[in-house]
Image: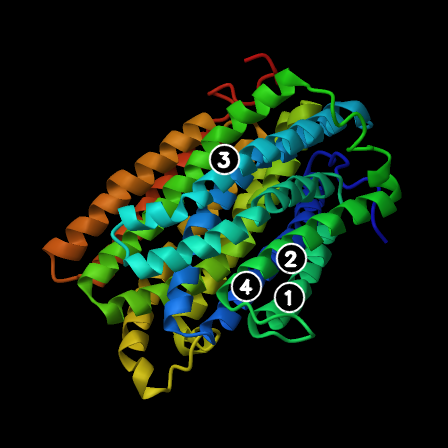
Amino acid sequence: MRSDRPLAPTPAGGDGWREEIAATFRLAWPLALANLLQMLVHAVDVIFVARLGERELAASALGIALFGLTMWAFTGLVGMVAALIAEELGRRRHSVREVRRSVRMAMWLSVVAALVGMAICWQGEALMRLTGQDDALSERAGDFLVIIMFAMWPMIASSVLRNFVSALGRPVFATAITGVALVASVVFNYALVFGNLGAPALGLEGSALASVLTSFVQLASYLIAIRLDRRLRRYRILGNWWRPEWPRMRELVILGTPVMIIIIAEAGLFSGAALLMGRIGPAELAGHTIALQIAALAFQIPFGLGQAATIRVGYHYGARDRAAMGRAGWVGIAMGGAFMCITAILMLVAPMLLLRIYIDPTLAANAAMVVFAVRYMKVAAAFQLFDGVQAVAAGALRGLQDTRMPMLIAVFSYWVPGFGTAIWLGFYTPLEGTGVWIGLAIGLVFSAGLLTWRWARRETLGLTAEPHHAF
């Protein structure tokens, strides 16, 4: 049975900790599972396009790299709506009008963000050429981007609605709807890439069109689910959709822009690491790609915990319960760290089992790649704990609407000690690829340490003070 009181305050004392653990788990597991399913949605595109040949796959990879970075950055921009909704519900349990205003302005912002993102994709071919990509490959990537760019708005808008249903205690909707999107992606790719089910065979362009159709199915599914659910329906999030709330819009932009920059900085670090690995050697780059995919798979759990921490801390922030704020943040951080310790052990004791998720490690053709992937996974095991802690600590701080200093921490950690160490160890010592991964680990260690320190000092730094909305 679904609870109609998903964000109810927790009692003090030992019961408070047990209740907080239970509440965080109820909120986090559907979000984490939705994150994993979303990875499968993207994997479906790769699986179908790979059958078209190496050239089409490379063009798709370039296009997705640009589209994906742009889209995820803008979901970070609108994602602070979850913290605002949680705070409003914590301050006043039935804050229908304020929640509706936040969602409405986040949806407005999704339109503006999508138009900017589409403009970037429209210039995709030129951007590819600027980065030194092959002319023919750049042209194919550009053809792909001018179609898939129409998925930008529904994807960003879906992330707004995902935050809304999660903050209102219906995170399982995100899981179910992402599952629907996965099925839709398989069907549309099967039909449009190779011309099945009476559809024309469109090849690479068919895969882009499949992504567009899947994104609209996902958005429609959210709107239908919200309409059918009694508790969510009463917020009438599309009511007065034409009415602006400029102070709320400004608040979303001010709080969300640092989150967007964090996403760009982190994505830039790992993209930069791939460029470094490519200069070291193709086998090293292949091993890096597989090891990074496994690390990214494990990261989806603390990422979901971080999303849950934002909502739980945000609720207590609005309720002015400082003790509960602390419990919510520390519970999320502990759960994220504990899970990543498990994945670290798996990487050390059963690397071949994890590699089988993506490749056949027994094939002779994969031998060199497997050697490097296993080597890099040993380093990944060392930074798993820090990766999980920094993800959840950042989420907890977002619940306190603290985003600007975490942005500075992330940019510094990733690009100064992180990327700097990667370059030094990768090119000026015999460590080469392993040195690049040690650099990634150093960046995550700095980020986890500084963000956790900031969370621990939240009272001294005044982060738990009375919320205000005048900037």
Q: Residue at x 48, y 50 (%)?
A: 68
> Circle 1 sits on which residue?
188
What kind of residue is marked 2?
Thr
At numbered mark 2, what does the secondary structure look like: helix, strand or loop? helix
Please report contact status of discs 1 and 3: CB closer than 8 Å, yes or no.
no
Give, as a three-letter code, the residue at label 1.
Phe
Which of pointers 4 and 3 lies earlier in the amino acid sequence? 3
| Residue 228 in the image, given as x and y percentages of width and height | 87, 47
Mark 3 — residue? Answer: 116
Q: CA distance from mark 4 to mark 3?
A: 23 Å
Where residue 437 appears, as percent x and y from the top left, is 28, 57
**Whether residue 440 is visible:** yes
Between residues 400 and 264, which one lies in front from this camera angle?
A: 264
Q: Which residue is mark 2?
A: 214
Marks 4 and 2, how far apart in space? Answer: 10 Å
Sort mark 1 into few (<14), some (14-19) or many (20+) by Cα contacts within 10 Å: many
Q: Is residue 418 left or right of residue 222?
A: left
The residues bearing labels 2 and 1 have C-alpha atoms spaced at a distance of: 8 Å
What separation in Å lies between label 1 and label 3 (alpha carbons)? 27 Å
Q: In which quadrant will I find the C terminus?
A: top right
Residue at screen point 66% across, 33% down: 107
Label 4 and label 1: CA atoms lie apart by: 8 Å
Vertical order, 92 against 137 (above or below): above
The local crowd at label 2, few if under 14, some if 14 to 19, many if 20 or more residues have their Cα within 10 Å, is many
Disc 4 marks which amino acid? Ser
Mark positioned earlier in the residue sequence (2 or 1):
1
Within 10 Å of disc 3 (Cα), the crowding (few <14, some 14-19, many 20+) is some
Q: Quadrant of residue 229?
A: top right
In-front residue for pair 342/13: 342
Secondary structure state at the residue bearing disc 1: helix
Mark 4, residue position: 207
